[in-house]
Image (cartoon, rainbow, N blue to C red):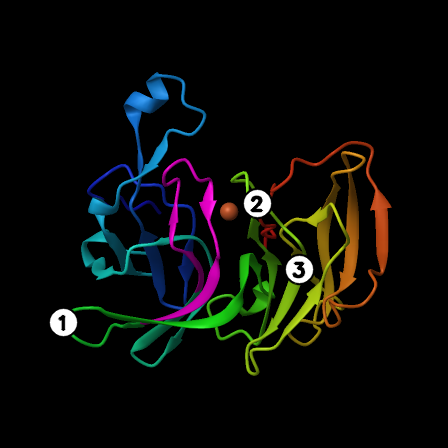
Amino acid sequence: MKEEIAVSAGTMIHDFAITDRDVVFWEFPVVFDLAAAAAGAVNPFTWDASCGSLVGVMPLGGPAAEMRWVEIDNGYVFHGTNAYRDDDRIVLDVSRIPSVFNDNDINDSPSLLNRWTIGTGGDELTWTTEQVSELSIDFPEIDHRVTGRAHSVAWYTETHDTADGNLEFPGLAALDVATGELDRWTPGPARQPGEALFVPDPPDSAEGEGWLLTFIWDQATDRSSFVILDATDVGAVPVAEIDLPRRVPFGFHGTWPADS
Ligand SMILES: [Fe+2]
């Protein structure tokens, strides 16, 4: 199926989330600048706070005519961790940064985990937010067997802005959602992980039991390695680290949907 959703400007939408019955989109004031693109700008996106910020909810599968939006605080969210239903509310954890592509900064950290609660029971959507982590974390991963339902563990990449405006990833962290505790792993100076991918093992394991896979970029050697961590004990020494024949682009990330 395909549904077309109208937006007011050419904004950069990077991610979305689903529950068992909703699709949730977030739109922040980062706009495509055609003139900058035509002039050959490396990054043709610019921050325009006047555009405002919205979160929208559509029934899973549409139609777009039933899409509802509510204004939210300005900022930027690249990635949502997961969303789920709690009666007539949607709970959604996101990594929020104050702004991005603003005054030539690549990324204004910190990227702080916020829990959004979106009320869908009334005529208008409602939205509240609560910060749930002091650590700057982004690039979320969960056990995808619980996508759209409440998750008990999530894994993140720590993010940190450098003085020259670049972004570095000092380590990974596992969040125990019930306690808020973070189990952190730092691969060492000038060695930076990327977003982690969780693989359950065995396939019918309890949530979060399995392996966490990531790439490390070693700035000293400009080479990459493939690392396997115990997803239940992220702070421990990796189970394996395998040198790769060529560097993996730093920051490369995505996900792996099975075909069934
Ligand atoms: Fe991304």
Question: Crowding near pointer 1: few (<14 within 10 Å), some, many (20+)?
Answer: few
Percent of width and height locating residue 147: 51, 66
Q: Secondary structure at mark 3?
A: strand
Asked if residue 81 shows in the view, the reply is no
The reply to whether the C-beta atoms of the residues labelled 2 and 3 are less than 8 Å apart is: no
Q: Is residue 179 above or below residue 101?
A: below
- Which residue carries the number 2 mark? 162
Amino acid marked by disc 3: Leu
Asked if residue 118 shows in the view, the reply is yes
- Which residue carries the number 1 mark? 123
Q: Is residue 122 above or below residue 27?
A: below
The segment highlighted magenta reads 94-117
Which dot marks residue 172? 3
Mark 3 or mark 1, whichever is nearer to me: 3
Q: Secondary structure at mark 1?
A: loop
Please give the name of the residue rendered at 64% of the width and 68% of the height, measured from the top-left corner: 174
Amino acid marked by disc 1: Asp
